[in-house]
Image (spheres, grey):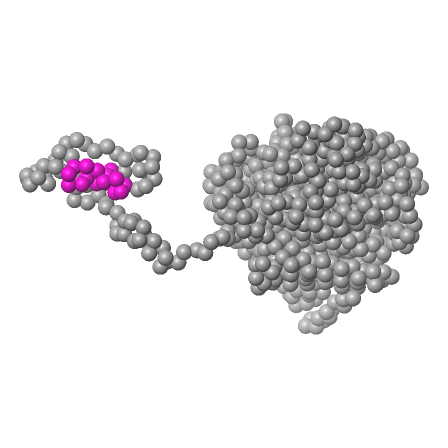
């Protein structure tokens, strides 16, 4: 088995994540889909590190995990804030920003 | 390599001093939040912010001639980086002035008294009444600026990714903290965040494919791999496309512009002005570096793609702006159209293209931040009057502000004797020189369409009867006045005597590899 | 250096099993109606990815993946889902008509483009393997550490900014402050007694309880019902259960000294 299979797997996961972002409307699920895309990129980095024979890809993947952790905190804080507002301040329209 | 020994990287601390100063002050200002009393925090933070920006600016100017790659090739300090640093620091200074304003709104500054208090709750009312201010915005602001500085000087894709996040995360938060119309503001923060995260995932996946192609994430390393390998193959092209999509999201190019109008409208005007000016500069700075340094060798592959996107961006931005009824949304589409024009400089892929883009970015930054300063001053029953109809007759009731706003509109439209004209002329000339004549013709048509909606605002201000509930211009404190004065002065001066800045950017027309 | 390392059968099996499960988890996440199910599906994907990292000679990252992603990130997601409400399926983002189909087509197009492009681009690509790179510093972790503190030291420092931003941001958006001093335990208990409130336990269905349901009021000796013996929310909703007339007369008779 060629390690490039891992790359194809990561491409599939990345695309599923992208579809999730575009199709789903729940902010939390959209956000999870973004996390899936980041994971797919990580798999690709790790596999390429092995194929290229240097560790840079693994370092990048490690940094991506740190970045993702920080991003998750901010994103979930924003989502929680909106949720609290929405529930207690009964907004009639689901969305205020329109085209 | 021998096991057990470690050679620490050599870092030219003087060369990267601006980043270190802003970063260090940001950390310091988090400590101020923890240890300084509530009433003293605001003045202390303001001194820190303005002081650190000025000191950083001093270091940028004092080493104008530095050209070096430091920290094992992670950061590159070259002409474009220094020019962009200078522009980013000055515009951040103006942005900080707008964010520090507290006399325009009778109830306090531009941010919610407590972002955690529920809109419309008793808590919120009490906090507002007591005049509490959310001083945590200042460390966030400084972190964002430090991210921008790193973003334009990053020489590898990993640092670029991290810097992109350092720049963006605080902005997502700041966008959601408006004092008025808080639901709109919070919703814009969510959209900005989700689409920003989506775009950075694209950036990252593109980076991974490029790493697979070249075995390195450093930009010069990728360029080397491109010239060394006989056939480029889909790995490189796909990686480049995804990476560029990630960056195009940040500059707001069509079809990746969906977040722009919502975020520009929802965020507090001061933050919008700051973000519209500086994020555009930082993102274009990074885009230019990636395109010129890493992909300079395959410009024939990426130019057609950017052609299409530039034309779409110019036309969609200009045409959709025509039908907007909200001034902030209109300026958002205007900024989209401007992205299209700046992309001409990217597509030119020449020294002239680079320096013309730098000039355009600076001219655009000052014009935009000034325009948003005016928007923050035009008010109606306590809040900002963002509906265009409220602006009718404003030029006659407040001649000075009307005239200042007209200058910004004319500059964005690219009328002679303003900075916008020199800027547009520069990128058009660079594009023609590189043989993109048809693109320039399209750009000229788009700028004529764009001129319509800029002039429409001027006509509305001067030749329409005042609205039933006309907006009034609130008297600002020194902060907004300075930002506004700086914006209009630079816009006019660059239009009349552009020579000094043109020479400056002409000296910074090459990326260090 | 350039010899191709042949992965063994074990790795092939691991790839197909874990890779398959990862894809199933990803699809499950996108398809699930409820956000909690999505979170559990994606946790499955992440654990399987951790195994694939280990199989891909990245043991350290495999561990970090388990600790950071499944351990911290997904738990945070679940935590927030609990706060927001497990059944939350409200739409927070604007969608345009026909957008779903267009998005699906776009996504499928992206999949085809990526898989076909990468499949073509990687056919015949050799694998160097990480044995030499790991051996240079005496191990995988040491090698990572060397890179992190040399070539990527600036990025390493910058992640500090990210983590501080995350902490400050979460606090700004969700930490609730009080505009008046909070009452101490002592003040709270004083309030309870001085305001003419009810100091002790509220009457529970006691001697004259005729039913053990929480919405059934206790009967007072004169046969009337005690309002405070049922929880306030039920009282507010007027949800107290009616008492059988026979019970009331029964109680009255008892208190008047008759035996039941």
Question: Which is the main secondary structure of the residues drawn in magenta?
Answer: loop
Q: Is residue C183 visible?
A: yes
The residue range painted magenta reads: C216-230
Seen at 16% across and 37% down, the residue is C223
Seen at 63% across and 39% down, the residue is B383
Furthest toward the right, the residue is: B433
B351 sits to left or right of C255? right
Q: Is residue B228 visible?
A: no
Residue B118 on image: x %, y %: 52, 44
Seen at 19% across and 39% down, the residue is C219
Seen at 47% across and 54% down, the residue is C180
Furthest toward the bottom, the residue is: B5
Residue B300 on image: x %, y %: 86, 41
B11 sits to left or right of A63? right
Where is residue A50, by image quadrant?
A: bottom right
Q: Nearer the viewer, residue B457 or C159?
A: B457
Relative to residue B79, is residue B283 depicted above or below? above
Q: Nearer the viewer, residue B334 or B371?
A: B371
Furthest toward the front, the residue is: B397
B406 sits to left or right of B267? right
Q: Quadrant of the N terminus of chain B?
A: bottom right
Relative to residue C65, is residue B107 depicted above or below? above
């Amino acid at each position: 088995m060629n390690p490039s299979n891992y790359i194809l797997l990561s491409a599939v996961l990345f695309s599923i994540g992208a579809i999730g972002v575009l199709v789903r409307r729940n902010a939390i699920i959209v956000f999870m889909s973004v996390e899936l895309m980041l994971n797919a990129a990580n798999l690709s980095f790790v596999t390429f590190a092995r194929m290229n024979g240097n560790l840079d890809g693994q370092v990048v993947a490690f940094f991506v995990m740190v970045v993702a952790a920080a991003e998750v905190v901010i994103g979930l804080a924003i989502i929680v804030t909106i949720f609290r507002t929405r529930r207690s301040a009964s907004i009639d329209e689901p969305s205020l920003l329109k085209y | 390599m021998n096991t057990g020994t470690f050679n620490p990287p050599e870092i030219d601390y003087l060369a990267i001093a601006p980043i270190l100063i802003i970063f260090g002050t940001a950390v310091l200002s988090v400590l101020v939040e923890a240890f300084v009393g509530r009433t003293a925090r605001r003045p202390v933070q303001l001194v820190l912010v303005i002081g650190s920006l000025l000191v950083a600016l001093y270091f940028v100017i004092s080493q104008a001639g530095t050209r070096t790659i430091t920290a094992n090739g992670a950061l590159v300090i070259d002409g474009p980086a220094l020019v962009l640093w200078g522009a980013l620091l000055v515009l951040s200074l103006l942005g900080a002035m707008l964010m520090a304003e507290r006399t325009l709104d009778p109830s306090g500054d531009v941010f919610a008294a407590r972002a955690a208090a529920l809109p419309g709750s008793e808590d919120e009312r009490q906090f507002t009444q007591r005049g509490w201010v959310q001083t945590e915005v200042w460390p966030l602001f400084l972190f964002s600026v430090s991210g921008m500085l790193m973003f334009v000087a990053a020489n590898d894709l990993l640092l670029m990714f991290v810097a992109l996040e350092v720049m963006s995360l605080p902005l997502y938060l700041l966008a959601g903290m408006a004092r008025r119309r808080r639901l709109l503001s919070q919703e814009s923060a969510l959209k900005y965040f989700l689409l920003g995260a989506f775009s950075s995932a694209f950036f990252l996946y593109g980076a991974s494919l490029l790493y697979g192609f070249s075995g390195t994430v450093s930009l010069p390393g990728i360029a080397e791999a491109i010239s060394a390998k006989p056939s480029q193959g889909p790995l490189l092209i796909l990686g480049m496309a995804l990476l560029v999509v990630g960056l195009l999201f940040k500059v707001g190019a069509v079809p990746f512009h969906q977040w722009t109008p919502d975020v520009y409208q929802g965020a507090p005007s001061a933050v919008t002005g700051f973000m519209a000016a500086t994020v555009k500069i930082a993102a274009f700075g990074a885009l230019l570096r990636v395109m010129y340094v890493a992909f300079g060798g395959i410009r024939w592959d990426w130019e057609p793609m950017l052609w299409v996107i530039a034309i779409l961006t110019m036309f969609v931005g200009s045409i959709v702006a025509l039908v907007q009824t909200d001034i902030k949304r209109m300026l958002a589409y205007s900024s989209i159209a401007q992205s299209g024009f700046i992309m001409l400089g990217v597509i030119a892929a020449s020294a002239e293209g680079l320096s013309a883009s730098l000039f355009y970015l600076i001219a655009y930054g000052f014009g935009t931040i000034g325009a948003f300063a005016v928007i923050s001053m035009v008010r109606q029953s306590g809040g900002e009057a963002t509906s265009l109809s409220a602006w009718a007759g404003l030029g006659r009731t407040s001649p000075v502000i009307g005239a200042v706003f007209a200058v910004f509109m004319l500059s964005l439209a690219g009328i002679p004797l303003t900075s916008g004209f020199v800027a547009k002329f520069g990128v058009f000339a660079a594009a023609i020189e590189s043989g993109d004549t048809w693109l320039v013709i399209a750009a000229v048509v788009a700028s004529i369409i764009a001129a319509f909606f800029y002039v429409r605002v001027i006509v509305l201000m001067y030749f329409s009867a005042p609205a039933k509930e006309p907006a009034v211009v609130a008297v600002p404190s020194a902060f907004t006045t300075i930002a506004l004065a700086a914006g209009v002065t630079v816009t006019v001066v660059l239009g009349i005597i552009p020579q000094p800045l043109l020479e400056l950017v002409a000296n910074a027309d090459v990326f260090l590899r | 250096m350039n010899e191709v390392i042949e992965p063994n059968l074990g790795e092939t099996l691991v790839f197909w099993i874990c890779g398959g499960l990862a894809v199933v988890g990803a699809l499950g996440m996108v398809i699930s109606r409820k956000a909690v199910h999505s979170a559990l599906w994606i946790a499955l994907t992440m654990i399987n990815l951790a195994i694939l990292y280990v199989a891909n000679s990245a043991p350290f990252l495999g561990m970090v993946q388990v600790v950071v992603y499944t351990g911290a990130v997904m738990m945070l997601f679940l935590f927030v889902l609990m706060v927001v409400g497990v059944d939350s399926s409200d739409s927070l983002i604007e969608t345009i008509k026909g957008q779903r189909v267009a998005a699906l087509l776009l996504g499928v197009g992206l999949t085809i483009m990526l898989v076909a492009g990468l499949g073509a681009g990687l056919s015949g690509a050799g694998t160097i393997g990480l044995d030499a790179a790991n051996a240079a510093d005496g191990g995988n972790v040491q090698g990572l550490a060397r890179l992190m503190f040399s070539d990527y030291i600036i990025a390493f420092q910058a992640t500090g900014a990210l983590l501080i931003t995350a902490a400050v941001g979460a606090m700004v958006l969700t930490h609730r402050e009080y505009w008046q001093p909070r009452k101490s335990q002592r003040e709270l208990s004083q309030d309870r007694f001085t305001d003419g409130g009810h100091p002790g336990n509220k009457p529970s269905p006691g001697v004259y309880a005729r039913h053990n349901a929480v919405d059934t009021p206790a009967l007072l000796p004169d046969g009337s019902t005690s309002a405070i013996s049922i929880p306030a929310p039920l009282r507010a909703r007027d949800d107290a259960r009616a008492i059988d007339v026979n019970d009331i007369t029964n109680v009255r008779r008892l208190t008047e000294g008759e035996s039941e």
